[in-house]
Amino acid sequence: MKKSLFVVLALLAVFAVGAQDLIIANGAEPASLDPALMTDTTSSNIGFALNEGLMVYDPQTSKGIPAMAESYTTSPDGTVVTFKIRKNALWSDGTPVKAQDFVYGWLRTLNPETASEYAYMLTMVIKGAAAYNDGSGPASDVGVKALDDKTLEVSLVGPAAYFPDMTAHHAFEPAPKWAIDKHGSNWTKPGNYVGTGAYILKEWKPQDYVLVERNPKYWDAKNVKLKSIKYLASDNSTTNYKMYKAGAVDWQVGITVDLIDEIMLRKDYQVSARFGTYYLSVNNTRAPFDNVNVRKAFAAAIDKTTLIDKVLKGGQIPTDAFTPAMVGYTPQPGVGYDPAAAKKYLADAGYPDGKGFPPLTYIYNTNEGHKKIAEYIQQQLKVNLGIDIILQNMEWNAFLDMRAKHDFFFVRHGWIGDYLDPNTMLDLFITGSGNNDGLYSNPKFDAAIRAAVLATGDARMKLLMEAENLLLTQDQAFIPIYHYSNQDMIDTDKWGGWFPNPLGYHPPKFIYKK
């Protein structure tokens, strides 16, 4: 008996003992269930069940819709947003949700000691947040105030019309001070976890699964249909697909590239455009990537169209830009595929035909699809630049830690928008951003992004396009590969409330069995 088949049969036996309403092959082990510390979609998929902020992502449009906040108003100049918290909003332990919980949660995210990689999202839009986060200003100057238990007032640095949608993101969720004070970093463990979401944390077996159960104290509990959800931790997409076909999994997040030709023929294969970009991150502060000509040489040496058409075949869109096209916004591309130009860039950098180029390792997290892409990139750089690179795969949590510490030369990366606006794609590259893993820094880029926060309409879009032009056309800070497509295995004839959507986020409160 083949090992993979044995694994599937064993898992079927396990699931038969204690069936859940919905079983999800979620990918790797979640890095964290603390909303202030989440950085990856694997963790946030579970976070959508356990917590809810002022807004929640609409399952069809990805826009923000009221959640903990029943309504909000915006001042005439767009710089003050006032949220009204639901009267029946409760934490999972029965404590009323108050505006003060949001103040505490947001200040905790901004506190430098928390080391939240997503703190920059708040610093970009909220008055006084940047100063508090960098230690130059007090918490009392941050523009988030509890006017009373159920009224939250937020003062912005500019008329950011997209701000209410931003608050659907986990960085803007409230935090239970009493639970954190009592348990410290262990507050996210089963039995200690207190959340605002439709589900509560029942079990967490590391490297195995996370089990959540319906929260009877949730404000909209009567409309939550699933009693429990199990999130499996497995980064082997081939095994996940076999479990899906065997009925041991109801929803596979992502697919296995090795079987794409078979998968494409299935009616339960869900594929749609996704607001995000797969790219190759390079450390701009380390040689040889501190040389813009090396970065441009790599960008010009990779045939992205052939990668999509011949290898991935999953509806991805090859791109030389980072931001997907939107109404009013024209993406600004970096260097496109041009082997002759790639050779010239490399020669200008001092490495003619690759001679003298230092040993280089490309790192990717364990996954069959990432491995295929890595092998393709290895071949392209050899053929078009005469460069040999070594490939290294790394377990997910170790990979995230390595990237966050900037301890790399050349790695796989990807970014899914946190809300539907070009700003969510670009502001992560400002100097010092928690997600600026490649340590790109250009004062002109920073100035354009910050000026865009103060602008509106066409003027704002022009500033954002100027920023992307600096990022890629001038500096080629990294190498975009393709815009993502959502790729999932789920039978929507069996499961309702699950829809293809631009961000690929699926809050489980909306999902039900037909």
Image: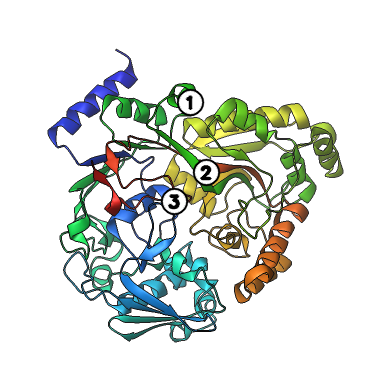
Which residue, as the protein is rendered here, is positioned at the far top? 1
What is the secondary structure assignment of the residue under circle 2?
A: strand
Foreground tag (2 vs 3): 2
The total number of labels drawn is: 3
Please state the horizontal and vertical placement of residue 92, each as a whole percent of the image. 20, 64
Crowding at dot 2, Cα within 10 Å, few <14 / some 14-19 / many 20+, comes out as: some
What residue does disc 3 label? 40
Please state the horizontal and vertical placement of residue 52, each as a whole percent of the image. 32, 63
Mark 3 or 1, nearer chain start: 3
Mark 2 or 1, nearer chain start: 1
Mark pair 2, 3: CA separation: 19 Å
Q: Residue at 26%, 28% (x, y): give it.
A: 247
Left or right: 264, with 479 as reference point? left
The label shown at residue 260 is 1
Which residue, as the protein is rendered here, is positioned at the far left? 17
What is the secondary structure assignment of the residue under circle 3?
A: loop
Which amino acid does the dot numbered 3 rest on? Answer: Asp
- Work out whether residue 424 or residue 447 is closer to the camera in this orientation and state it: 424
Which amino acid does the dot numbered 2 rest on? Answer: Ala
Crowding at dot 3, Cα within 10 Å, few <14 / some 14-19 / many 20+, comes out as: some
Q: Residue at 72%, 51% (x, y): give it.
A: 476
The label shown at residue 32 is none
Tell me whether the residue at label 2 lies in contact with that at label 3, contact meaning CB atoms closer than 8 angstroms: no
Foreground tag (3 vs 1): 1
Q: Residue at 22%, 25% (x, y): give it.
A: 10
What residue does disc 2 label? 273
- Quarter of the figure with the C terminus: top left
Give the quarter of the image for residue 217: bottom left
